[in-house]
Image (cartoon, rainbow, N blue to C red):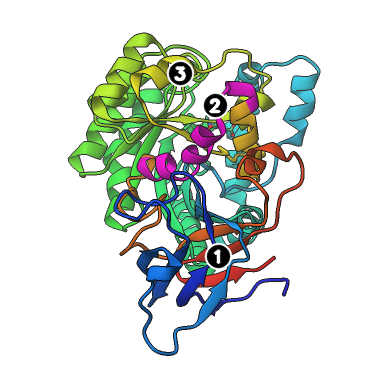
């Protein structure tokens, strides 16, 4: 059977090969079967030990490898237009910063996003989401940051929520009002940050549209002091923070974010030893974004070995956005994290499951499989797990179980 089905996943799943790290610690290590009841995992173990209620449906997994549903923990999926023209400009020698300073960059996506209706944004983001869902993504983070006014940020975040309902996946929304200075505030950065902190964030949080708060802390975006002002506003509302940190330069953003107990620091190509130590102390996840690194032809590799030695959990994400990472394959990011950043295959797979869940505060329900958790997983028709990182430009078409439904069969 090929295509998209939406049958219940309830029943016994057997003939599974469990990928390393896929199960919670309370699950037997030699498990080869799962029981689903009411969309939740009821039991994990050896088939021979299964105690089944009468008339339990049976699903033969055919020896496929089992991983948890994948998690894309850093995306800017909702926006208008696209920016292929900037790709050409950069090929001709312009840098990302030069394009941004010349009025391109984020601000040009802001224009296109403001012009688009909520339904238009929903349609374009839905089409992009399909690529990720086909790869087994069951949870995604979606940031605002291309609206940069209360009404347009609200529009983006509403689309993010609607995507979750429409496609049946977990969506975590992140308010990124401090992504760039909108043109109408040119030269008035302090006024804009006040607007973000005093009006936009409180209003959107009150509407239930904000799960976390992010800032682009960079020379071409917001300063360390402005970042802290936004973090204080988030803290006052009880919202967790994360940060676009040390992407183009070492601003000291990671250490600041760690002081606010950040869920994650993302990009971190220029992360310092102090930043790593602070992240270790606060349990902050390092989110690696090889798609942006690749697209910008960056050469400064994040300090992977130091993060590894410090025991900082590393996640891997698409950073899907129209400027620096038009990537719609999380498995390609797994490949690039290995090839460009020298992650091991198990590290990269933890990066799109367990550690990605932690970067979103979802570690108690997502990123690993075990009793009491929702049925979110992927069955991969591959001979060995390393194939998930190995293939380039083609992917094994998996069986996907999301929120207790079989949403795709090979
Ligand atoms: O994560 N670094 C800042 N924000 C995005 C890029 C946004 C854009 O260029 O549109 C990123 O890379
Ligand atoms: Fe980003």
Name of the residue lying farthest toward the front: 48
Instruction: Please give the residue where the numbered disc 3 appears in the rendered image.
Output: 246
Q: CA distance from mark 1 to mark 3?
A: 45 Å
Determine whether label 1 and label 3 are within 8 Å by CB.
no
Examine the rendering and report whether any part of residue 382 can be seen. yes
Q: Which mark is residue 401?
A: none
Instruction: Please give the residue where the numbered disc 1 appears in the rendered image.
Output: 15
Q: Residue at x 32, y 44 (%)?
A: 201
Is residue 141 positioned above or below 104 on the image?
below
The magenta region covers 339-358
Q: Secondary structure at mark 3?
A: loop
Determine whether label 1 and label 2 are within 8 Å by CB.
no
Tell me the quarter of the image containing the N terminus.
bottom right
Q: Which mark is residue 343?
A: 2
What is the quadrant of residue 84 in the picture? top right
What is the quadrant of residue 300 in the picture? top right
Examine the rendering and report whether any part of residue 256 can be seen. no
Mark 3, other Cα within 10 Å: few <14 / some 14–19 / many ≥20: many
Could you say where residue 51 lies in the image, as x and y percent from the top left?
Answer: 35, 77
Q: Earlier in the sequence, mark 1 or mark 3?
A: 1
Is residue 242 positioned above or below 25 on the image?
above
Q: CA distance from mark 1 to mark 2?
A: 30 Å
């Amino acid at each position: 059977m090929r295509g998209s089905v939406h049958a219940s996943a309830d029943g016994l799943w057997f003939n599974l090969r469990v990928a390393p790290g896929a199960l919670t610690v309370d699950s037997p290590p030699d498990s080869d079967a799962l029981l689903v009841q009411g969309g939740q995992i009821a039991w994990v173990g050896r088939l021979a030990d299964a105690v089944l209620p009468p008339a339990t449906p049976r699903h033969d997994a055919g020896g496929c490898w089992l991983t948890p549903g994948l998690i894309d923990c850093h995306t800017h999926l909702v926006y208008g237009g696209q920016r292929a023209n900037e790709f050409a400009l950069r090929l001709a020698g312009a840098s990302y910063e030069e394009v941004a300073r010349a009025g391109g960059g984020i601000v040009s996506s802001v224009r296109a996003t403001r012009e688009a209706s909520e339904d238009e944004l929903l349609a374009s983001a839905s089409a992009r989401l399909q690529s990720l869902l086909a790869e087994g993504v069951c949870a995604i983070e979606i940031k605002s940051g291309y609206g940069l006014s209360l009404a347009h940020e609200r529009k983006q975040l509403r689309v993010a929520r609607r995507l979750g309902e429409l496609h049946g996946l977990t969506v975590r929304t992140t308010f990124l009002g401090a992504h760039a200075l909108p043109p109408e505030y040119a030269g008035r950065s302090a006024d804009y940050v006040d607007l973000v902190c005093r009006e936009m964030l409180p209003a959107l949080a009150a509407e239930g549209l904000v799960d976390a708060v992010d800032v682009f802390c960079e020379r071409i975006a917001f300063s360390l002091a402005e970042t802290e002002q936004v973090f204080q506003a988030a803290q006052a509302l009880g919202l967790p923070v994360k940060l676009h940190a040390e992407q183009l330069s070492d601003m000291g953003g990671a250490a600041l974010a760690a002081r606010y107990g950040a869920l994650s620091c993302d990009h971190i190509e220029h992360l310092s030893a102090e930043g790593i130590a602070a992240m270790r102390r606060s349990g902050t996840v390092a989110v690696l974004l090889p798609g942006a690194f690749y697209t910008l032809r960056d050469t400064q590799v994040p300090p992977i070995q130091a993060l590894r030695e410090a025991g900082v959990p590393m996640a891997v994400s698409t950073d899907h956005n129209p400027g620096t990472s038009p990537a719609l394959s999380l498995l390609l990011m797994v490949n690039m994290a290995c090839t460009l950043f020298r992650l091991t295959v198990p590290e990269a797979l933890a990066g799109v499951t367990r550690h990605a869940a932690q970067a979103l505060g979802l570690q108690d329900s997502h990123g690993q499989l075990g009793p009491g958790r929702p049925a979110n997983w992927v069955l991969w028709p591959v001979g060995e797990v390393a194939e998930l990182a190995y293939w380039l430009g083609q992917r094994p078409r998996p069986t996907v179980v999301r929120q207790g439904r079989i949403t795709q069969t090979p």
